[in-house]
Amino acid sequence: MFIDKSFTQKSIVSIAGAGGKTSLLFFLAKKCPCPCLITTTTKIEARHISGADAYFTFSDFLHQSESFSNHKVTWVSPSLDIENGQIIGFPLDLFYEFADCAKKLSLPIFLEADGAHLQHIKAPTIGEPVIPLDTNFLFHITGLDVLGKQIIAENVDRLDDFLKITGTKEGDFITEAIIEKLILHPLGGFKNAPVDCKRIAVLNQADTPKLEAQGDSIALHLLENGLECVWISSMNPAREMFIRAVTWQGKQLYNFWL
């Protein structure tokens, strides 16, 4: 199982949340069974795109389509100019032009649709996340290492929105129940999700047996409350990396390793 049997070379995969979006972006792109495109609809640290095999502006993309089959992972953005260490992504109207071109070339797109200011948990504020309407798969990622930490600005992105969505107070400690509420809330993890896209929660940084077990507990709650699939992952290159997908098979939980 790569993502889902319905994944095609014309799919659009969006990633929101906090705690490993860029690592997941490149994991998916490199595991993709065909050449693919990566980009963002927000901003990304310029240093983070170094894992791509090639880089093009959208203008170059339009005029050099014959080049893309020669690369496994290609970055495309309106400009490659760096502003304050970041590359600016596609506004949605221009993204749709890009997506139409990609579909004609049968090149799937993987994109970051959210920012988190290096935090590992966040709540979306007004205008976030920036998810294209033709997204087929939406991943929401949370870093499990926030469990037990205080709900303060140093640990949580968009603190005021987080407090409203989760019903918590500043200074409370993050629990499994709080993460579950954030992910399932209509204004939380899957805010702005297109109606027909598949939603997958990613519980990242399961870097210890305890965190992995807590991830399993959260995953069960999410699956019992309407999500079809949860990924539990550790993408720290200093450790053994893994992604384990948890889903229902009949009335039983089933695990797939990616």
Image (spheres, grey):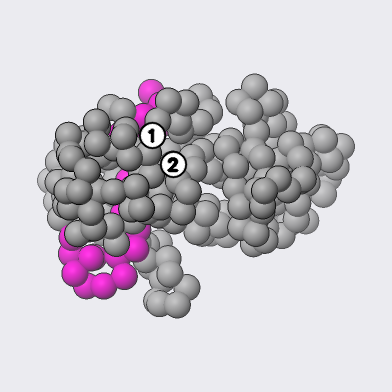
Q: Looking at the image, is 113 positioned above or below residue 82? A: above
Q: From the viewer's perspective, is the residue at label 1 or at label 2 nearer?
A: 1
Residue 25 in the image: state x and y as whole percent.
52, 52
The answer to which of marks 1 and 2 sits earlier in the sequence is 2
Residue type at mark 2?
Ala
Q: Point out which mark residue 90 bears.
A: none
Mark 1 in CB contact with mark 2 (< 8 angstroms):
yes
Pointer 2 residue: 16
**Is 83 placed above or below 205 here?**
above
Q: Which residue is mark 1?
A: 124
Q: Residue at x 39, y 76 (%)?
A: 240
Across and down, in percent, residue 89 comes to: 64, 38
Q: Quadrant of the C terminus?
A: bottom left
Q: Give the residue type at disc 1.
A: Pro
Q: Residue at x 40, y 30 (%)?
A: 125
Residues drawn in magenta: 188-214
- Tell me if residue 162 comes above or below residue 93 in the rendering: below
Q: Identify the residue at image location x=58%, y=36%.
A: 41
Question: Does residue 95 belong to the magenta stretch?
Answer: no
Q: Position of residue 15 (x, y in %)?
A: 47, 43
